[in-house]
Amino acid sequence: MPVSEAWQERLASAREQRFNEQRWRHRLVNTHSGLDFAGNDYLGLAQDPRVQAAQEEGARCFGAGAGASHLVSGHLAIHDALEDALARWTGRERALLFSTGYMANLGVLQALADPRTAIFQDRLNHASLLDGAALSGARSRRFHHRDSADLERLLSRSAATHKLVVSDGVFSMDGDVADIAALAHISQQHNAWLMIDDAHGLGVLGDNGSGCVAGFDSQRVPILVGTLGKALGTAGAFVAGDAALIEHITQFARSYIYTTAQPPSIAASTLEALMIVQREPEHRQRLHHNIRYFRQQAQALGLPLTESLTPIQPLLLSNEPRTLAWANQLAEQGIQVGAIRPPTVPKGAARLRITLSARHTCHDIDRLLEGLCACLREEAACPA
């Protein structure tokens, strides 16, 4: 068989299998004409005129793109200013910008770990953390979700000289929060470093929106990763820690060294968004009001909520056909939600991933709840 035919058969087989499992994904063009309960713009800053104006001004002052990697000629004064601001915000000595959160996690783990390192990860960690551990070549073990006793057991059995405990701060599909205090305590007991990816906590939780690691310094949480494309409404990511850590990552993280720096316009808009987060707590207050309102109403309707108190509010529907049917029915009403299926979540754990924003009104949330009620009524009228 010609090579080209072999490849075409391989692609067709994978495509057919995913179609048959009802796990084929489609890109949707978001026209902003309906209600978005699927995105991660938790504070609504992506649509804030001040953030948009800062991006325009950044492009005028510094150009549309950085033109090179940070270590060649692409590191500009606006990048320096943003890194300094992020370090102050998170209570760290220094911060280092990456182009995406995925690249940050890949780069940090590849730079720090090697085959002599043992990495211990929460079972529900983001794919970028799992891939970063695999890229590093380290020995990797996964402890049960938010199970400190299981982590303790695995660490006590490890003879590795260098141990690294890694966890999401807020888990992206469940919305629950890691027990940072327990992770920090156990890590210190076993002479392990702790790395927290607080992508979904920064801007949303903690004092001044500084995330679920607020109150934990570099001694207890040495490695902090955050993204800029969620609560801050822009794009990119950073890692924060002490000077020795940041200098090491600068020198050894391949996803930092060998890529073009973040566009300076994005750095400028992120700096503006960060100032808004710190000086205007009303955005965060409005978000948490919306979370409470949604949960109270959803519980009264008997919807299958989880225990999440963050903007991520999953409705567990168990199987893929049901999840797709609900998402499609909502889409027909102009309401977009995430239809999350395996392999993103375990088999039997398909769900609607509903995300709330400070931009949502109670009327918006009522429309969503009415749509969810219609899904329930249709199921009751036409049982499977």
Image (spheres, rainbow, N blue to C red):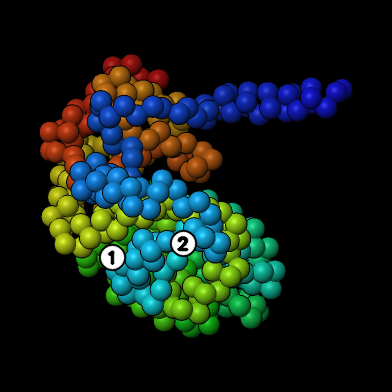
Q: Residue at x 60, y 68 (%)?
A: 252
Which amino acid does the dot numbered 2 rest on? Answer: His
Q: Residue at x 53, y 54 (%)?
A: 68
Q: Percent from the top left, x then y, of residue 148?
A: 45, 69
Name of the residue lying farthest toward the top: 382
Using the numbered discs, state the Cα–Cα distance from disc 2 to disc 1 in whole angstroms. Answer: 25 Å
- Quarter holding the N terminus is top right
- Judged left or right of residue 107, residue 375 is left
- Judged left or right of residue 128, residue 339 is left
Are the residues at dot 2 and dot 1 in contact (C-beta closer than 8 Å)?
A: no
SS at mark 1 in the image: loop
Q: Give the answer, above or below, for where 50 lies relative to 238.
A: above
Q: Where does label 2 land, which residue?
A: 75
Q: Percent from the top left, x then y, of residue 336?
A: 31, 30
- Quarter holding the C terminus is top left
- Give the number of the disc on residue 139: none
Q: Where does label 1 land, which residue?
A: 210
Q: Give the answer, above or below, for where 11 lies relative to 298.
A: above
Point out the frontmost of discs 2 and 1: 2
Q: Earlier in the sequence, mark 2 or mark 1?
A: 2
Q: Residues within 10 Å of mark 1 (few under 14, many from 20)?
A: many
How many badges with numbers are in the image?
2
Which amino acid does the dot numbered 1 rest on? Answer: Ser
> Closer to the camera, 188 or 361?
361
Q: Percent from the top left, x then y, of residue 382?
A: 33, 16
Q: Percent from the top left, x then y, of residue 53?
A: 24, 46
Q: Residue at x 54, y 69 (%)?
A: 249
Q: Quadrant of residue 211?
A: bottom left
- Judged left or right of residue 142, residue 42 is left
Q: Residue at x 85, y 23 (%)?
A: 2
